[in-house]
Image (cartoon, coloured by chain):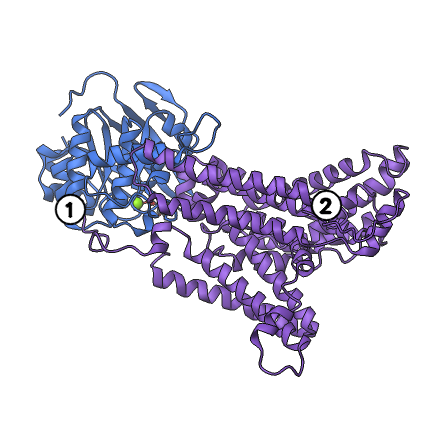
Chain colours: A blue, B purple
Amino acid sequence: MAGNTGAPLVDLRDIHISFGGIKAVDGVSLDLYPGEVVGLLGHNGAGKSTLIKCLSGAYQADSGEIYIDGQKADIQNPRDARAYNIETIYQTLALADNLDAAANLFLGRELTTALGFVDDARMEAETRKIMARLNPNFKKLKEPVSALSGGQRQSVAIARAVYFNARILIMDEPTAALGPQETQMVAELIQELKRQGLGIFLIDHDVHAVKQLCDRAAVMKNGQLIGVVKVDEVTEDDILAMIILGKKPEHLAA
Amino acid sequence: MTDVSHSGTGKTRRSVMQTLEIDTRLLGMIGAFVAIALAFQIWTGVRASAGGGFDPIGWLTNGRFLIPQNTYNIAVQTVSIAIMATGMVFIIVTRHIDLSVGSLLALCSAVMAMVQTQIMPHYLGLGLEHPLNAPVAVLAGIATGVLIGGFQGWLVGYQGIPSFIVTLGGLLIWSRVAYFVVGGQTIGPLDSTFLMLGGTNGTIGALASWVLGATGAAIAVWGIWAARRGKVGHGFAVKPVWAEVTLSAIAAAAILGFIALINATQIPPGRLTRIFAARGETVPEGYTEAFGLPISVILLLLVALAMTVIAVRTRFGRYIFATGGNPDAAALSGINTKLLTVKVFALMGGLCGLSAAVASARLSNHSLDLGQLDELRVIAAAVIGGTALAGGLGTIHGAILGALIMQALQSGMAMVGVDAPFQNIVVGVVLVLAVWIDIQYRKRSGVK
Ligand SMILES: Nc1ncnc2c1ncn2[C@@H]1O[C@H](COP(=O)(O)OP(=O)(O)O)[C@@H](O)[C@H]1O
Ligand SMILES: [Mg+2]
């Protein structure tokens, strides 16, 4: 694991978010180091997405603080998050189906000509380049992304993170809609990005995958953080027990 | 990763249409337009050659629909709806609707009428027919549209009230406000400079029309080849040269053909006599003169060009389509979709103002029923033109063609004497049919 020395890349401190009466996230603190993958586990409705959405700028915490590189960060909206090199890959929400891959990759950060018009040719050329690296089979550059397979769509989203030099990557169930081979592709990409020193939050329901890909696993239930464990020190059953019982197994609770 | 996404079997023979990369939906609409025109041409032709037996050629040549004077009228009558339809494309693409456009047009027209007949001449003491009256009136009308449109957009975007409700309210409110602004009276005659926006009162003559057309054709051809050079520069595949040449020829021929049609319309002798009399001259024997392009049509072409550039070449346009395709994705990409909504509605309002100038100038006064039911025509034009109510899909040229199809239908039916109630039935049927055909087309071609 990347050395846990120095300030963490991300430090979420005592985050609270509620919707109406529901405490979706209830006092969660979690950190992330460069070159580290932290898995986020828990039942549906546990608050995983809500927690990471306050890091990606989609929601704002009711209380709590976010530190990036040891500095207090102010993230009001997705644009702020991007300024901190935080990129997010969502299970479903990521792409505008009616636009092509290049338009999606550069959405919100279009390359423009000297006159300020969008430079579609240059964006397409850049998209070709990065896709040749990430997913050489990717050919449908001119079609709306609705014509793409789940894996191809996800590779557009990942290309976005890579192209804009993400340092912090948030992946919310990135493989939920993918077949086995495409899931494997995403797994390989995660390992590649980890080697490059990115810090990654990975929300995934597959305990087996989390154990393989992650350095640490954080388990949530009913908005609360049950515990954070190093995956090398626990079994899949230990993690499952945490998810289901909502408490750390006795032998880990030290 | 192993994508299983072979597109066809590789080197299959591509059809001519595919090679030219012509939008088949656009082609379909042009086909529908031509079919409507020919149907009315034959219908009126059969009447004109009554008792002449079976003579299709005679019917076509004797028809009254495709004569220059009539096509000229259709062009002029289409402008007001077409200008608003371009704005409606953006509204519908972002998954909204604007039911208030006809009503807002009435209010903008009322403001313009008051500015040029009351405020400028009397309150500011500039007198009637002052050169500033028309420009100030037009600006005031457009500003009114932008402000009210922007306000409606704010209610939709920031307050979360559905656009259907906000603009249904607007439909009821603004026409009444217009009524109070003019004190319930028809206002006229309007400023003579202002009337130049209306159609035949403001035309640029045959020569200037040719010059404009030739310039337009040159720019279009240059654009096609500049785009090709750009693609080659990035190493992308390009169409074969013959395809580019064909496209250039079609573009140039379409533009120049349109100018030829416009210039074929002569100023009626009576009017010519009046024009000469105003200069203290008499019309020389055998003298004729063409109107040339009306300023209103030039305005529409400029609006179409600007809106197309916005749609395909600017970030604003890109965000409009992204938001329509997936509002959540757009917001998560850092696009301020609320502010975008305000801008889109403000733009729609501004176009209502411009449209109001054209519409009231054409009638040469502000009448109380101006703009009535326009919202339905505008929405129908956009939808017939291929704008999908589900959002994310639509083109400016499609909406203009949609407006043209509707106007051609109405003019044609009026010409052959179809009763007004029955005209509405036909337009209604065409609207539903057009959307049905579009849905079928999208299913077949696999486009969502
Ligand atoms: N925008 C929202 N409005 C209201 N409730 C929400 C919203 N987003 C999440 N919630 C609620 O917060 C809780 C946590 O949801 P979520 O973070 O999506 O869970 P998870 O991602 O772990 O499945 C759930 O009870 C959910 O219904
Ligand atoms: Mg979730």
Q: Of helix, strand and loop, which one carries label 1?
A: loop
Report the amino acid beneath label 2.
Thr
Task: Locate residue B284 relative to residue B256 in the image: left or right.
Answer: right
Q: Is any atom of residue A249 visible in this view?
A: no
Disc 1 residue lies near ligand 2 with CB under 8 A: no
Q: Position of residue A98 (x, y in %)?
A: 39, 48
- Examine the rendered structure and indicate whether residue B339 appears above or below residue A3: below
Between B195 and A15, the residue placed more toward the observer is B195
**Which residue position is annotated with label 1?**
B2
Q: State how many labels appear.
A: 2
Q: Of helix, strand and loop, which one carries label 2?
A: loop
Chain under disc 2: B
Crowding around mark 2 (Cα neighbors within 10 Å: few <14, some 14 to 19, many 20+) is many
Q: Which mark is residue B203?
A: 2
- Examine the rendered structure and indicate whether residue A18 appears above or below residue A194: below
Crowding around mark 1 (Cα neighbors within 10 Å: few <14, some 14 to 19, many 20+) is some
* Rendering quadrant holding ligand 1: top left
Q: Looking at the image, is mark 2 or mark 1 earlier in the sequence?
A: 1
Quadrant housing residue B152: top right
The residue lying at 65 percent from left, 72 percent from top is B44
